[in-house]
Image (spheres, rainbow, N blue to C red):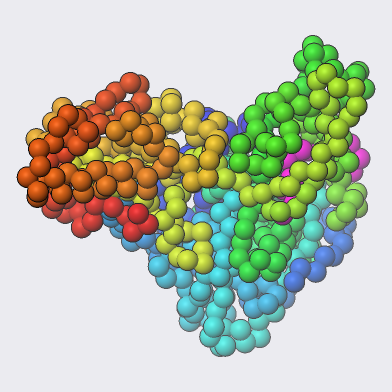
Amino acid sequence: MSQIKANPLARSGLTQSAIAQTVPPADLNRSNSFSSMNSTAPNILAPTPTTTPPLSGSLSSSLPPETDFFNSVVKVYCMHTDPYYSLPWQMSHQQSSTSSGFVISGRRILTNAHSVEHYTLVRVRRVDRDTKFIAEVQAIGRDCDLAVLKVSDEAFWEDLQPIRLSQLPRLQETVTVVGYPLGGDNLSVTMGVVSRLDMHCYAHSNGSCELLVVQIDAAINPGNSGGPVFNSVQDCVGIAFQGLKTSVTENIGYIIPIPVVEHFLLDIERNGKYTGFCGAGFRAQKMENPQLRSFYGLSPTDSGILVQQIEPLSSAYQLLLKGDVILSFDGVRIANDATVPFNYTRTSPSTLGVGHRISWSYLISQKFPGEECALEVRRKGQDEILTINLRLSSADPLIPLEGRNLRYPHLDIRLPSYFIIAGLVFVPLTACYLISEYPFESSVVPSRLLDLLENGTKHVEGEEVVVLSQVLAHPANVGYDYLRNIQVHKLNGEKILNLKQLAGIVEDHLTKVSTAKIQNEEVEGNLLRYLRFDLGHGESLILNSFEVLEVSPAILSQHNIAFNKSSDL
C-alpha cells in the first residue's frame, strides 16, 4: 500500500500512530495521518469459523440485540510510562489512556498492543458494571498490534460470554464497530461497509512485515482501538486499530482481520509466547519491464519477481543469489507486479470473487517462524527451473523498533540502552529513537541514518548501529558539542559491532589507564593516553584518557544521571 507511505519513515511508524484514546508523550508523538486509535483520558483506538451471511440492508437486522454481545466489550484503562529515548536514563511522565477490548474463549481479552504499550497498570470495566478490574498483560504482538489480557477476579467473568471469531468479511458487507471512542464514557456503535482488503505494514509495527488489513468507512476514532467489529450475526470479523486521516481523505478506517488474529493466538498456543510473523529473508523488485524480463531469461509466459538483496543471517543467503527470479511461492504463481490471486478458497469460498489480487507478501504472512516454503526459481544462465525449500524466520532488521533492554521478561516491551563517558552519550539506533529525535519531520533525519533504517541488513549476530547521540558539554570535551546523531564506526581502531562492545572497549581501556596511574607508570605513545572515536563523515573525536577518568563522575552528577550505562550493559 505504497500510497499510504508518505515518506520512507512510514516503514517504522515514524509517520503513523495508533488510535488509543491517548496522546503519546511529546518525545514519542505518533500522531499523524496514518494513525492507530487509542484515546487519552480523553485522548488515544478457540476461534469458531462461521459462514458470512448475505448482506442486510436494515439497521435492525444487521445490529443484533445488545444483550447478545455488548456485555463482552470492555473499556480498557491503562497507565503508561514511556521511555524517553532522547534522554535514555530517564522515563517520560506518566500518561493515562482509554481504549477498547473484548472477551474471547479461554477467559481472555483481546485488545491492541498500542493500547497497553509500556503499561504500569491496566484495568478493564464491563459495560454493565461500575468496577474496574485489574488486568494482566499476557502477550503482546508489536508487528500485528495485538495483545492478550487476563483478569483473575472471578467477579469479572460472571455471566460473560466469549465473542465468536468469524472469517474475512466480503466487500460491501455491512459491519458494526463497537467500542469506547472520544465523546463520552459509554459504549458507542457505528456502522459502515467493507471497502477494501489489502496489505499494510501496521502503524505500530517495526515495518518488518506486511499484514492483511480490512478498510471500512465506519467512524473509527481515538478510543476505538481494540474494539470488535461485527457482522450481521454477532460474529467478530475484525478489530479496530488505525485510520488514515489527511486533508484529502474521509472515512478511512482499518481493522485487523480475523486471519491475522488467529495467527497471533495460535503462535502463543504453540510456543507459550508470541514469536512474531515471518520475514522472507530477501528483498525483490517487480519485473513489469519487458527488457528486464528478457535480460534475466524469462519467456513471454513466465512471470515473477527479481531478488535484489539477501539478508546475510537468513537461510535465503545460502540458497538464493542476487538476480534470481522467484516464479512461485508454495505453488502459487507470482505475477510481474508482485501480486498473487486472492480469493481465500481455504477459509471463505468466494469471499472476493474471481480475479482479485494482492501483494505476494500475503503468502509469507500465513507462515510461522521455522516453517518452510517451496520456491520455484529461474537462475540466469541455467535452463532448468530450480525448486528451493526455504526455512522462514522472524524478521530481524538492522534498525529495530526498540533495543535489547527488556522491560518485562515475558513481553516484547523494551527500554532504551545507553552508555555515557566523559559526557559523550552513545545509543543504539532504533526507530523509536528517531521518532523521539525527529517527531514531526522525517526530511530532517540524517540521510545516512535514514538509509540504514530503510535498507540496512545485519551481517553478524548482535550487530547494531551505534550513534553518538549528543555531547554533554564540559571543558574535557569542548569543541565537540556540534556532534549529534552521528554513527560510530571505530574505537581505537577496532570496528564497533554494538553498544555493549563499545562500552567494554572503553571500560577495559580505562582500567588499564587507572592501573598505570596507580602504579605511576609512564604511558608512552598514544595507546593508553587517548580514546579515539572514528565517526561518520570522516569525523574524529579524541579524548585524553586521564581526563576521562577524572571528569566522568562529575559530568554525571552535574546532569543528575545515576548510572553511566543501562542495566543491560
* Residue 413: image location, x then y, percent: 47, 59
Name the residue at 43% across, 39% down: 497
Q: 102 or 432, which is in the foreground?
A: 432
Task: Please say whether residue 360 is one of the residues in the magenta stretch.
Answer: yes
Residue that extends furthest to the top in the rendered view of this protein: 291
Task: Please say whether residue 7 is one of the residues in the magenta stretch.
Answer: no
**Count of numbered badges drawn on the protein:** 0
Left or right: 47, with 137 as reference point: right
* Residue 179: image location, x then y, percent: 59, 63
Rendered position, 25 above or below 74: above
Q: Which residues are magenta?
A: 353-368
Left or right: 220, with 435 as reference point: right
Rendered position, 477 above or below 504: above
Q: Quadrant of residue 276?
A: bottom right
Rendered position, 413 above or below 489: below
For the question of whether residue 551 can be seen, the reply is: no
Looking at the rendered image, the quarter that the C terminus falls into is bottom left
Name the residue at 68% across, 62% down: 267
Name the residue at 24% across, 29% down: 541
* Residue 368: image location, x then y, percent: 72, 54
For the question of whether residue 343 can be seen, the reply is: yes
* Residue 475: image location, x then y, percent: 9, 35
Q: 512 or 472, which is in the foreground?
A: 512
Q: 542 or 240, which is in the foreground?
A: 542
Residue that extends furthest to the left in the rendered view of this protein: 520
Left or right: 260, with 493 as reference point: right
Rendered position, 238 above or below 284: below
Name the residue at 30% across, 38% down: 469
Looking at the rendered image, the quarter that the N terminus falls into is top right
